[in-house]
Image: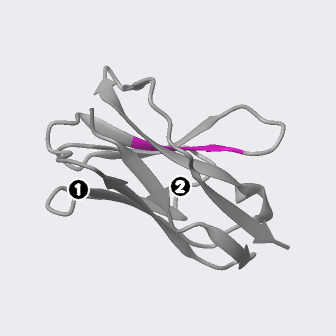
Amino acid sequence: QVQLVESGGGLVQAGGSLRLSCAASGSIIDINAIAWYRRAPGKERELVATVTAIGETNYADSVKGRFTISRDNAENTVYLQMSSLKPEDTAVYYCNPGTVAGGYYYPRDYWGQGTQVTVSA
């Protein structure tokens, strides 16, 4: 099974930007879709964005227009470019392999360590 490792988190002021990376230990070509999730303290895990093998993307309403997910199959990496960050974006961010079908994302039961994003006011 391909392992995914998240990186790129950090501390940033509100209005700033960060780019998260999700690096795979092997090829991601055969993975139907990859998602970014986040979990804020005391909250449920939230689906943030998905990208399919052919580059179709989808976003949570809370991040539309601010975050961009992209997939580089040659580099076996998925990125999440985050701009205009808000304190409510503070969370641990995880990438996850899965499947998009019928307009829904179905995650595999695989979760890495995640990367912490902290946005100060």
Look at the picture and state if 66 lies above or below 37.
below
Above/below status of 33 relative to 4:
above
Q: Amino acid at mark 2?
A: Lys
Q: Which residues are magenta?
A: 35-39
Q: Which mark is residue 64?
A: 2
Q: Residue at x 31, y 20 (%)?
A: 102
Position of 67 with respect to 2 (left or right) is right
Query: Residue shown at 56%/46% (left/top)?
Result: 113
Position of residue 80 measured from the top left corner of the image (x, y, whole percent): 45, 61
Label 2 secondary element: loop
**Taking 7 as reference, is 105 above or below it?**
above
Residue picked out by circle 1: 76
Q: Is residue 37 in the magenta section?
A: yes
Q: Residues within 10 Å of mark 2 (few under 14, many from 20)?
A: few
Question: Few, some or many C-alpha atoms within 10 Å of disc 1 (few <14, some 14-19, many ≥20)?
Answer: some
Image coordinates for residue 79, horizontal then vertical, percent: 39, 61
